[in-house]
Amino acid sequence: MDSTEDKRRRIRIQFETQVFLGFDSRDTTLEASIKNISMNGIFVETRESIDLHTPCRVEVILNAANSRLTMETQGSVCRHDAAGLGIEFKNDIEWFALFSIFEHYGKKYLENG
């Protein structure tokens, strides 16, 4: 187990969906894909390099065949590497269970829908 794995205290779900990160300090919004999510953060696949501790607005999008759900929260960059950015949420997300449910039921519905 590497040092990144050792620091994780929460369950992480491998979950791919669209995310928008808004950085006021850069006056920009970054559109990317989430690789995984937990109650207290996400890992975003991107080639952008953002300084550690940079605050951001996080907008996670869940698209289904007939609906769209948007989750918004605040966070900051807690790590970065060649694969992307780790974003730590300012507060735990209350809607974490939805990602597990959507992963199990929602994607099957989209595939069969």
Image (tube, rainbow, N blue to C red):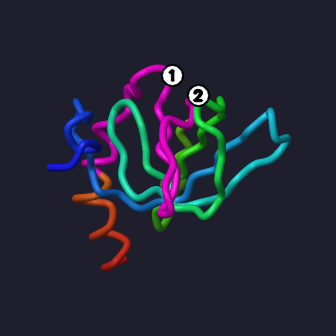
Q: Quadrant of residue 32?
A: bottom right
**Left or right of 101 in this view: 17:** right
Q: Could you tell me which residue is drawn at 48 percent across and 42 percent down?
A: 79
What is the CA distance from the residue labelled 1 to the residue labelled 2? 6 Å
Location of residue 96 with respect to 107 vertically, above or below: above
Mark 1 lies on a secondary structure that is loop
| Figure quadrant of the C terminus | bottom left
Q: Nearer the viewer, residue 92 or 101?
A: 92
Estimate the x, y position of residue 54 in percent, counting from the top left.
65, 32
Camera-side residue of 62 and 75: 75
Q: Could you tell me which residue is drawn at 71 percent across and 41 percent down?
A: 22
Q: Is residue 93 magenta?
A: yes
Which residue is under mark 2? 74
Q: Which residue type carries mark 2? A: Gln
Quarter residue 24 falls in: top right
Q: Earlier in the sequence, mark 1 or mark 2?
A: 2
Going by the image, does 16 lie left or right of 87?
Answer: left
Query: Circle 2: is it few (<14), some (14-19), or many (20+) Cα within 10 Å?
Result: some
For disc 1, the marked residue is: 90
Task: Give the farthest residue toward the top.
Answer: 91
Residue at the far front: name it. Answer: 3
Which numbered dot is residue 65?
none
Please state the extent of the stretch shown in magenta in the rendering.
Answer: 73-101
Please name the residue shown 34% across and 32% down the image: 39
User: Pointer 1: residues within 10 angstroms few (<14), some, or many (20+)?
Assistant: some
Q: Callout 1, which amino acid?
A: Lys
Q: Secondary structure at mark 2?
A: strand
Q: Is residue 77 above or below residue 2?
A: above
Labels 1 & 2 near each other (Cβ < 8 A)? yes
Q: Position of residue 60 (x, y in %)?
A: 54, 46
